[in-house]
Amino acid sequence: MEDNRHFTKNLFISFLIVFIFMIFWQMYVGKNVSKTHSAQQDTTSTVEAQKTAAPEQSGKTSLIGGRDTLSVTDTLWDAKLTVLSSPEFDVNIARLGTYYDVYLKKYHTHLLDTTFVRFFFTGYEAYSSKDTFVSLKNGTRVSFISRDSLKIKSFTYKPDSYLVDFEYADKKDSVVSVEFYGDLYLNPKNVKEEKRVYALVLKTGKDYKKFPVSKLLKKQEVYKYPFKDVEFVGLKSKYFMFVVVNNNHEEGTLEFGVKSGKPYFKITENKNNAHFLVYHGPIEYFLLKKIGYGLFANYDFGGALIAPFSMAMLYIFKFLHSFVPNWGWTIVLFAFLMKIVFFPLTYKGLASMRKMQRLKPEIDKLQKIYKNDPQKLQKEMMELYKKHGVNPFSGCLTLIIQLPIFWALYRILRMTIDLRGAEFIWWIKDLSVKDPYYILPILMGITSIIQAKLQQTGAQDGQTKLFTYFMPIFLVIIFISLPSGIVLYWFVYNLFSVFETLLIKRLEVS
């Protein structure tokens, strides 16, 4: 009995260690995608940004509620801004026909870091005027025409969409290029977490690659790809992305890397016109799936083994949320459903542990008889278990089955944009960030201790008592900085486990 109890306890410890390791791996190491194309040193000359500060823009350049203000540092690019509005976003375009800022209305946030960002087609001499706005059935188009009328840049914005149609024509030059140079806006309240997942993304056919910006800044390499093989390229943060879609698969070259401390990508085609689609908006799986172009690949479900579980979790959460508007209560409901689903396994495991406790005198007797013959001892113990219908591994089965589910749940609760800014009750104002008062982690630790005590049987040795208190405290330390949505699930799951254990004990008595 003692050996099997220690086996169950050690397997449980192993389960927790593996789970915690996976969390640390995700948070501090991440997945580095191998770069199969050869790299060359970035020798591209760049021009430093002008340092003359312009007056700070009002209205469109401030977050709602005054939570943040973005300043302008380059007067050449932001003069005479053209402001385009749609139900989803406001876009500021400079007089040169270059993107300056994107403000996402639903999420009350800027997409681009306007202290220094460029997104432009070839040429800097374009200008805008009132008659360049054209209303279309499928949106609004604004055009920027050069003074010699040889170049035109057009941006068509579709209603209720984050997708924009970009066109460029040049009657003179035979080379067209489009370049993004700068950063996405990272939330200063969660900047460490944002930087861990901040990456340049690239999809070529079925191959999806992520190049962490932190690694690009360190290596200072330039990567080149045939543009006809590229599905899309761009930058993504934790919740948002800015990508160029190659909807026509034209001949050309894509290069990306770092310029003057900023990530960039540049597309060059040997012709006098270009046509791209650009997506600037949230990384929301169902929205991206609807848009197409493989953009849903940017939603990170995890590795091949975890991805099916993560996708199932996302669909379940969306379904539950259709009935329960508050995401916090959706998490509570999901934890309750998990308890119902796993109740038969939990009941069977605890019942098996009780049976093993009753067999302890016979097990002790066998251990004395065959203390010098481990193989014979193991055989006799298995015969004893079989005779009394006891499965020594049943207590671990539930933990093993739940490991991929817990990990998939961790990924969904950590990455889904639906939890961003989602309130629960009282002090929990945002389920995507840590509990500001650490109440949930502490409650999770307390319920873990109560649960461990309720599951104990018979006299406890010093190691078991230490484990009862050490693991909950250790988990509190790990979970204290995780998003409150994740901690809420673990706390509620532990709370239901306490009531479940009391129920099972009552059933056994009756």
Image: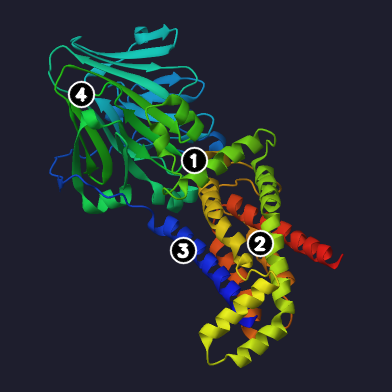
Q: Quadrant of the C terminus?
A: bottom right
Q: Tell me if label 1 and label 3 are in contact, CB under 8 Å.
A: no
Q: Quadrant of the N terminus?
A: bottom right
User: Can residue 372 be seen by looking at this rendering?
Assistant: yes
Sequence-first disc among 4 and 2:
4
- Looking at the rendered image, the disc whose residue lies closer to the viewer, 4 or 3, is 3
- Looking at the rendered image, the disc whose residue lies closer to the viewer, 2 or 1, is 2
At x 72%, y 77%, the residue is 357
Q: Which mark is residue 444?
A: 2
Q: Residues within 10 Å of mark 2 (few under 14, many from 20)?
A: many
Q: Is residue 449 above or below residue 72?
A: below
Marks 4 and 2, how far apart in space? 56 Å
Q: Tell me if label 2 and label 1 are in contact, CB under 8 Å.
A: no
Marks 4 and 3, how far apart in space? 48 Å
Dot 2 lies on which element?
Answer: helix
At x 44%, y 17%, the residue is 158
Dot 4 lies on which element?
Answer: loop
Q: Which residue is mark 4?
A: 122
Q: Residues within 10 Å of mark 4 (few under 14, many from 20)?
A: some
